[in-house]
Image (cartoon, rainbow, N blue to C red):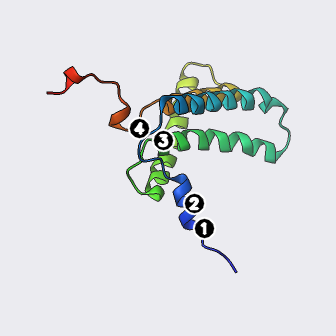
Amino acid sequence: MRRDTTGRLLTALRAPRGGTRLGHRLVAAAVTALGGVAIAANSPHLPGLSDRLVVVMFVVAAPLIALVRLLPGINVLLALIVGAAGSLVVNVLIAQAMLTADAWSPPAGVVAVGLTASVLWLVPSDHNSLPHTKEDFP
């Protein structure tokens, strides 16, 4: 008998309500950046199709997950759609900037996408995590 795991999947994908601490965001950013560098360093040595799928999955999934985390208050499916569109925009803008600067290479593109996703991880996702002082409020 098949069990319905949709509810569990949506719970796992949903961002935490209270926001994430800076330490968690720093770890996620470091892992994303190091993952991009590691994939780019090994990409010339990837002969098979399945190995190249890892590169494509990273380039699409890294910005997608970082962008979905920034949308905690909306439906998970809608957040995934917006994250996918944002991931496409990030990839196109990076490719366009690298082609304009005559600096295009696939490993450098993977590193640039990883670093951009790392910067997206560092953006606070709620107003409570922004630094402020009591003087800012009346």
The amino acid pointed to by label 4 is Ser
Q: Earlier in the sequence, mark 3 or mark 1?
A: 1
Residue marked by disc 2: 9
- Mark 2 and mark 4 lie on one chain; the one further toward the N terminus is 2
Lateral position of residue 23 relative to residue 32, left or right: left
Amino acid at dot 2: Leu
119 w.r.t. 54: above or below: above
Q: Which mark is on residue 67?
A: 3
Task: Tell me which label, 2 or 3, sits earlier in the chain.
Answer: 2
Point out the tag, 1 or 4, that comes first from the N-terminus: 1
Q: Residue 125 carries which label?
A: 4
Q: Confirm or deny contact between disc 3 and disc 1 (CB under 8 A).
A: no
Gap in Å between the C-alphas at discs 3 and 1?
24 Å
Contact check, label 2 and label 1, Cβ < 8 Å = yes
Q: Which amino acid does label 1 sit on?
A: Thr
Task: Please say if the residues under marks 1 and 4 sit with CB atoms less than 8 Å apart.
Answer: no
Q: Nearer the viewer, mark 2 or mark 3?
A: 2
Q: Which of marks 4 and 3 is nearer the N terminus?
A: 3
Q: Is residue 53 above or below residue 77?
A: above
Measuring 61% from the left and 31% from the top, which residue is drawn there?
114
Q: In which quarter of the image is the C terminus?
A: top left
The residue positioned 57% from the left and 62% from the top of the image is 8
Residue at far front of view = 134
Q: Distance between the residues labelled 2 and 4?
A: 21 Å
**C-alpha gap between disc 2 and disc 1:** 6 Å
- Across and down, in percent, residue 112 comes to 60, 26
Q: Residues within 10 Å of mark 4 (few under 14, many from 20)?
A: many
Q: Which of marks 3 and 1 is in front?
A: 1
Disc marking residue 76: none
Secondary structure at badge 4 equals loop
